Every structure is written in C-alpha cells, then in structure tokens.
Amino acid sequence: MNVCVIIPVYNEQDFIKKSIESIVSQTTKPQKVIYVNDGSTDETKNIIRKFSEQYDWINLIDHKVKKEHEPGKKVVEAFNFGLRNLDIDCDILCKFDGDIIIPNDYIERIINIFSEKNNVGVAGGNLYIRKGDKWIYENIAAKSHVRGPIKAYRYSCFKDIKGLKSSIGWDTVDVLLAQKKGWEIYTDKSLIVKHLKATGKKYSYKSKMLQGQSLYVMRFGIVLSLLSMLKSSINNFEISKLFFGSLGFISAFVRQESFIVTKEEGLFIRKFRWNIIREKYLKF
C-alpha cells in the first residue's frame, strides 16, 4: 500500500530534526513526505531542506500566510495546500505534526492495520509526553481517539468524508463523520508516539475560547459542549479552559458562526456522543 505523509510545520526548530530522523529510519518508508512550511520564522525550513536534499522522497514547500497562527484552522489550510501539491496516488494518507517521534515500525504497522482490517478508515497510535525522566500518556483525549498529530486515513475514507474541515475541532469531526459513513476507527495503544511539545502549551486565552467555538460549529449543543469542556479542564487541571471555552461557545452562538456539519450530521454526532456517555458513565 502506498503511504503519503503531509506535515504542516510552524517554528519547529527545537523538534523537527528528531522528528524527521524517526521517519527516515522507518522499517517501511513512505512513498512521499511533504513538509509544508507554514510561515516559520526560525530555522525550521533550513533543517528540513537538508533532509530533502538527501532523500528524494522528502519534499519541502512554502505556504504563504498572512493571518496569525490559529490552532486547527491554519494547520488544515497548510495540510490542504500540501495535498494539492501531492503528485502521486496513495492508499494511505497521513497527517503528522513536526514535533513527534514515531517508533521505527510505525508506518509498517499502520499498513498492516489497513491491510488486515478492511473496514478501518482512520488509524493511529497514542501520544506520550515527557514528565521528568518518564514518558506518560498525554491525557487530553481517550486512548481510543486517534489524535491530530498522528492521523492515518485510508484514502477512500478520506474522500468519503470529503477531506478535513478548516476549523478547530477538525480532528474530532473527521472521525465522527467517518463513523457516520460506516468506517471504523482503530487505535493501536502499543504504538507509543513521543510528543515533544505538549498540546496547548502555549495556547492563549483566545485559543481556549476557540475550543468552545469548535464545539458550537460541530453542533454539539450546549449540554454536550459543557460536559466536554469540563472533562478537558479536569484532565488538564486547568479550570480556565472551561471558563474561556464557555465564553467561546457563547460568542460563536451570538455571532451565529457557520456550522461545519449539516443538521443531519449534527444529529448523528449528538446521538453518538450521548451513547458513549450512557455506556461509559450511566451504564444503560
């Protein structure tokens, strides 16, 4: 199966070298890797260029940007720019981040998942962050959720969900829409990926407000949104996420932000999430 990887990068000079080294050391190499430089102002571009000169399957392209760097939306816009520059066919399309270290057999095992499980549409491992001298699970999502920095899509599934939404929350709505289309989501919890920069480490209050906005545009509804933001605040020991997220939700409602899913899709999302809550917490 042909594997293509698109990696948007923005000021990743402290992490990018180790990340690329983990890709070039794979037991099964991807057919193509495209790094999309999304307006970096540090040495990120120069570091990638050295590898692209050494490996002909690694490409570097520039995405000209003028807007400030927004979580979610900007990374998808950069990814889509890379996708438009992909000039070969692929069976598996990966969206990675530039601050991860994947195990040496990651690509090989992802291929095996898609080869052996015909109905799997999205697959990946789990993200771990460094705490002291240990690597611990980055507890901001369930271990069954395939996180944004390590997404792998069966290309037919990717087309089925009509690609990625240019909005924060894209890495939640994609798997929900895939499940609506009948695809399965598979997480191999033994595939431990090192996340060198903890998610949201530098998020401003505006970014936290965008979390609430994302739940609004995904049609979660107010109760599910509050529960989701409360869980995130508890997992991260950061009550401000609930406060600013709620402000973001209210702001999106007042401004009547455009939804990124249809009414039908929104209904499916709410029913699906409520079923998970009932099964996990309410036991009926």
Image (cartoon, rainbow, N blue to C red):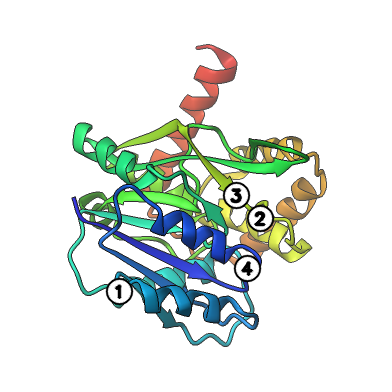
Q: Is residue 51 left or right of residue 43?
A: left
Look at the numbered discs 2 and 3 and tell me whether their residues touch, using CB distance below 8 Å: yes
Q: Nearer the viewer, mark 4 or mark 1?
A: 1
Q: Nearer the viewer, mark 2 or mark 1?
A: 1
Q: Which mark is on residue 255?
A: 4
Element assignment for label 2: loop
Q: Residue 264, can we see it?
A: no
The numbered mark, 2 or 1, whose residue comes first in the sequence reads 1
Q: Nearer the viewer, mark 3 or mark 1?
A: 1
Q: Nearer the viewer, mark 3 or mark 4?
A: 3
Q: Which mark is on residue 195?
A: 3
**Where residue 244 sits: x, y (%)?**
77, 55
Q: Amino acid at mark 1?
A: Asp
Residue found 59% across the figure and 80% down from its top: 40
**Where residue 58 sits: x, y (%)?**
35, 71
Q: Which residue is mark 1?
A: 56
Look at the numbered discs 2 and 1 and tell me whether their residues touch, using CB distance below 8 Å: no
Q: Which residue is mark 2?
A: 197
Q: Is residue 158 left or right of residue 69?
A: left
Element assignment for label 1: loop
Residue found 65% across the figure and 80% down from its top: 42
Q: Amino acid at mark 4?
A: Arg
Residue found 44% across the figure and 73% down from its top: 51
CA distance separating discs 2 and 3: 6 Å
Asked if residue 241 is positioned above or below residue 56 in the image, the reply reads above
